[in-house]
Amino acid sequence: MPTMSKTSCHAVRVFALGETMLMLAPPPYELIEHCDQFTVYVGGSEANVAIGLERLGVHAG
């Protein structure tokens, strides 16, 4: 039986289990040794699949 979220009335259809990773990237054309700001990107295959399914309209959690 699908699990219901307390904050949503939609049942979770796909449950992605795995590691979510963060990539800290320096600004374009700067070396990591000389920068003081980074851009954060979310990665990991499970997170990518869940995000893709949500964009297609399939509720993933």
Image: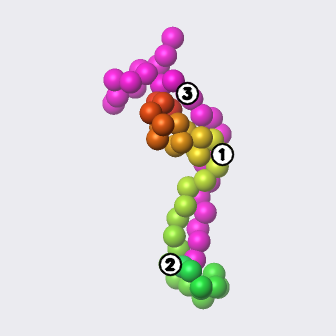
> Mark 1 or mark 2, which is nearer the start of the sequence?
2
Q: CA distance from mark 2 to mark 1?
A: 26 Å
Q: Are the two marked residues, 3 and 2, in contact with CB atoms closer than 8 angstroms?
A: no
Judging by the rendered image, the residue that carries numbered circle 2 is 37
Can residue 40 be found in the magenta stretch?
no
- The furthest residue to the top: 1
Which residue is at a point 66% across and 45% down the rendered structure image?
Answer: 45
According to the image, what is the colour scheme of the structure? Answer: rainbow
Q: Which residues are magenta?
A: 1-26
> Mark 3 or mark 1, which is nearer the start of the sequence?
3
Looking at the picture, which amino acid does disc 2 mark? Gln
Label 1, residues with CA under 10 Å away: few <14, some 14-19, many ≥20 = some
Q: Which mark is residue 14?
A: 3
> Mark 2 or mark 3, which is nearer the start of the sequence?
3
Query: Could you tell me residue 1's position as x and y percent?
Result: 51, 11
Query: Could you tell me residue 49's position as x and y percent?
Result: 59, 40
Which residue is at a point 54% across and 42% down the rendered structure image?
Answer: 52
Query: Could you tell me residue 58's position as x and y percent?
Result: 48, 30
The answer to whether residue 20 is visible is: yes
Judging by the rendered image, the residue that carries numbered circle 1 is 45
Q: Main secondary structure of the magenta part?
A: loop
Query: Could you tell me residue 55's position as x and y percent?
Result: 46, 41
Looking at the picture, which amino acid does disc 1 mark? Ser
Mark 2 or 1, closer to the camera: 1
Judging from the image, what secondary structure is the residue with disc 3 in?
A: loop
Q: CA distance from mark 1 to mark 3?
A: 14 Å
